[in-house]
Image (spheres, rainbow, N blue to C red):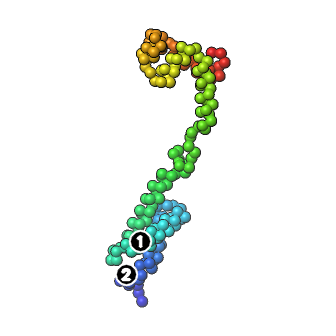
Amino acid sequence: MPFTPEKEDQLPLETQVVDLIPALRSFARTFFPSNFEADDLVQETLFRALRSIDRFQPGTNLKSWLFTIMHNAFRTQYKLRRREAPGAVDCAEMPIPMAPPQEWCVLSSELHKALDRLAPDHREVIVLVAGYGLSYKEAADICDCAVGTVKSRLSRARDELAGRMNGVPDF
């Protein structure tokens, strides 16, 4: 008995889907050169199709419906792979580039020691300008000196502090 398209519509829908697996594999190979990845895409397509087989409208093209499902599955996988690409710079699996907190504690302690060794007027200016973020004018008003004096003290204090933080014993 010859096979006719009318008889194909009389087969159960699941059987029609199984009959289209070779066409699905061929279409999947257009997305992936690897047989393994193509087979995974076919499997995902079949899973999605059989899960929602009740949504298929009889009388429409089953092959087109399955190809659309495959295309959408590929796009979803593609987006996920781009977002979570192994070896990428911003990969979610890479460690967060953050210094261990104990280094900050050590640096903080060293900074406090270095600040304590500064001359009192240098320490006062660097704390007011660099620490509290005051302007030169505001710092000059608090220290009761000229703006130029604040700039000079701040420059010397920064140089001395940088030297002490870099291990220079007597700056």
> Which residue is labeled 1 in the image?
52
Secondary-structure class at tag 2 = loop
User: Disc 2 to disc 1, how far (Cα)?
Assistant: 19 Å
Image position, residue 125 (x, y; %): 50, 17
Picture quarter with the N terminus: bottom left
Decide which of 166, 19 is in the foreground and name it: 166
> Which residue is labeled 2 in the image?
9
Image position, residue 131 (x, y; %): 50, 24
Between discs 2 and 1, the one toward the N terminus: 2
Mark 2: which amino acid? Answer: Asp
**The furthest residue to the left:** 59
Residue at figure coordinates x 49%, y 20% from the top left: 128
Please identify the quarter of the rendering in which residue 163 is found: top right
Mark 1: which amino acid? Answer: Ser
- The correct choice, above or below, for 27 with respect to 155 in the image is below
Picture quarter with the C terminus: top right
Q: Residues within 10 Å of mark 2 (few under 14, many from 20)?
A: few
Decide which of 66, 28 is in the foreground and name it: 66
Badge 2 vs badge 1, beta-carbon distance below 8 Å:
no
Residue at figure coordinates x 46%, y 11% from the top left: 144
